[in-house]
Amino acid sequence: MNNSRPIHTRHLGHNRHPGLKPGSKAPQALTPKMLETLTTTVMPAEVPASTGPHIQHPWSSRTGGCRHEAGMTDGRRRRVIVKTARADGWTPDQVRGDGRWWKALALALTALTATPALADGIVDNVNGLAPTADGRVIRFKAVLIDAAGKVTRLVPPNEDPPKLSRKQLKKNAGKPLYDWRIDMGGKTLLPGFIDAHGHVTALGFGALSLDLSTAKSLDEAKSRIAAYIAANPERHWITGRGWNQEAWGLGRFPTAADLADVSGGHAIWLERADGHAGWANSIAMREANVTASTASPAGGRIEKAPGGAPAGVFVDAAKALVERAVPQPLPKERDAAFLQAQQALLSNGITAVADMGTTLDEWMSYRRMADIGGLRVRIMSYAAGVETASRIGGKGPTPWLYDDRLRMGGVKIYLDGALGSRGASLKAPYADAPGERGLSFLSDTQLQNQMSRAAMDNFQLAVHAIGDKANSQVLDAIQVLSETYTGDRRWRIEHAQVIDPADLKSFGKFGTIASMQPTHQTGDRTMAEARLGPQRLAGAYAWKSVLANGGKLAFGSDFPVERPDPWAGWAAAFTRQDAQGQPPGGWRPEEAVTREQAWWAFTGGAAYAGFAEGKFGNLAPGQKADFIIVTGDPLAADPATLRSMKVEQTWIGGEKVFDRNGGVKTPAK
């Protein structure tokens, strides 16, 4: 194999997994349980691990995966897999296996086989609502969908869906206009939500590991840690995430000493809620060879105990000092995490996501899932740095793969840390820590060099910047680079949480996109006030000011930092209040956007931010039919009702991929 070729050209999947013809059996969704069957029962333990820059599975051939053609027999399917497996270096005995192994594999592949192509259809009798970029709302009563899973027309409320006349019907050989029709009974149909900033694999691992996100105190966190260790005694390394010392009212970071009485001989490593700090016990630090003489790396900070020993918390780049000792997940564990995350996204009506900081291992997990029909949500991938982008895409972004399900089009660069761990880079010291200004990961020159390396190969730039100094750095870099890299670049700043008011006007100069998360404002409010002091709040979470100065908004959640809940984000964006309605009147309500502006930022605006507006976003004719079915009207709901809305069905490309009532039902003819 020529490993010098970019990853995306070496392992293309050619299977579509479109919607269903009437009367055909719906494909069984790939679940973590099925994945366990595929990766344990199906793949015997003695099968050697694949080598090379990407992972091969027996059902994932070099030429595009096992072909799941209509009518392929189990015997033919077996021959294809045998050929692929032998090519990957398996011995005949390992390939042959026993009857149970092949039966399990055949059943698994049958469950994941592509279904017949979607026929023309209509989703009828809906309260259809779709936003526009200028704040208008398009209302419709039906959606016409073609065989490619694209919207052909939104039928206005005052029209009936088109029908063939008797003459036309006769000319059409008696065939109906639609191959299938489904009556939604007047329920509301909306475009699928697009989360403009998330971390897909991290969301899945968070759900599969120790979760401290709802712990209200240090004692409660310790109790959960002890219970998790008791339930998983075989795990030497205990990993998890979600702790937040601010929510505990602790007034300090937790320490390794706090974990001493619950460790039970296990190494413990727990990420903070924002992902920018980690909490280790003494065993973890010992196994990572971190001692009092270990220096804080550039762009990171080791919290110290009195006397100079590491206290147990590692901020930003310092996290790597411990993470290098943590066992890396196996491919099957990454795949299980993806499936867990995908289920959470689909159940919340999220049909597409910008995956920020995609690693090579994560990219290959998405490819494996797509090759066997397990990738349903659309992923706009932003690689973890320029080197990763080059390894995946080569000299430029990948094409859209798997029927527009996956594309790596940009690069994620970190410039500073987060407010909660005092890693956000500020122009003036922190109000509650006068000696600290946060962490700046790159100088102006280094930042411009990294951005230039990506831009010269036409990768889109998405730069993480939270503090006002970091945001100023990015805006200055965009101004400098725009002289060389012209055209439609769509420069992105991820988070843009604290901006010097004097810098706001720079957003409009080059159409810079502020990729922001409304629930960060509601979740961080009291902490941000303490960190920044009253004078710097004028540019904090300044959504309306970004728009007023000519910038563009794309909204997301930053899951798993916040829950992947677009209803909560939508409500927060136009109320500036949390789920309890606090504070009364909203926090700095002058920065609220309208309900319609917020909705656009979670749909069409988020698609635009990923160069995907021609593919999906707001159900415009020609776009993919990605939509959700809900009960109630989100445009008429009060904020509390909006937050409580549930998605009943999620459709992607004209295919139903989630049904809260269970299963995926075929449209009626």
Image (cartoon, rainbow, N blue to C red):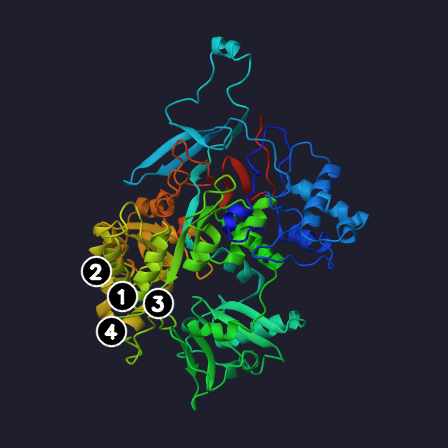
Disc 4 to disc 2, how far (Cα)? 15 Å
Mark 1 or mark 3, which has the lower sequence index? Answer: 3
Mark 3 or mark 4, which has the lower sequence index? Answer: 3
Query: Foreground residue, 432 or 2?
Result: 2
Mark 4 or mark 2, which has the lower sequence index? Answer: 4
Residue at image location 72% in from the left, 43% down from the top: 106
Helix, strand or loop status at disc 2: helix
Query: Foreground residue, 175 or 53?
Result: 53
Residue to which mark 3 is pinned? 416
Helix, strand or loop status at disc 1: helix
Given this view, does label 3 or label 4 mark the residue nearer the observer? 3
Residue 314 image-quadrant placement:
bottom left
Query: Foreground residue, 579 or 118?
Result: 118
Note whether residue 330 is visible.
yes
Q: Are marks 1 and 2 in contact (CB under 8 Å)?
A: yes
Residue to which mark 2 is pinned? 503
The disc at residue 468 is: 1
Q: How would you rate the neighbour count of disc 4 (Cα within 10 Å): few for under 14, some for 14-19, many for 20 or more?
A: some
Residue 47 image-quadrant placement:
bottom right
Mark 1 or mark 2, which has the lower sequence index? Answer: 1
Note whether residue 590 is visible.
no
Q: Is residue 370 above or below residue 282?
A: above
Q: Position of residue 573 (x, y in %)?
A: 33, 53
> For the residue marked with disc 2, what is the amino acid?
Asp
Residue to which mark 4 is pinned? 428
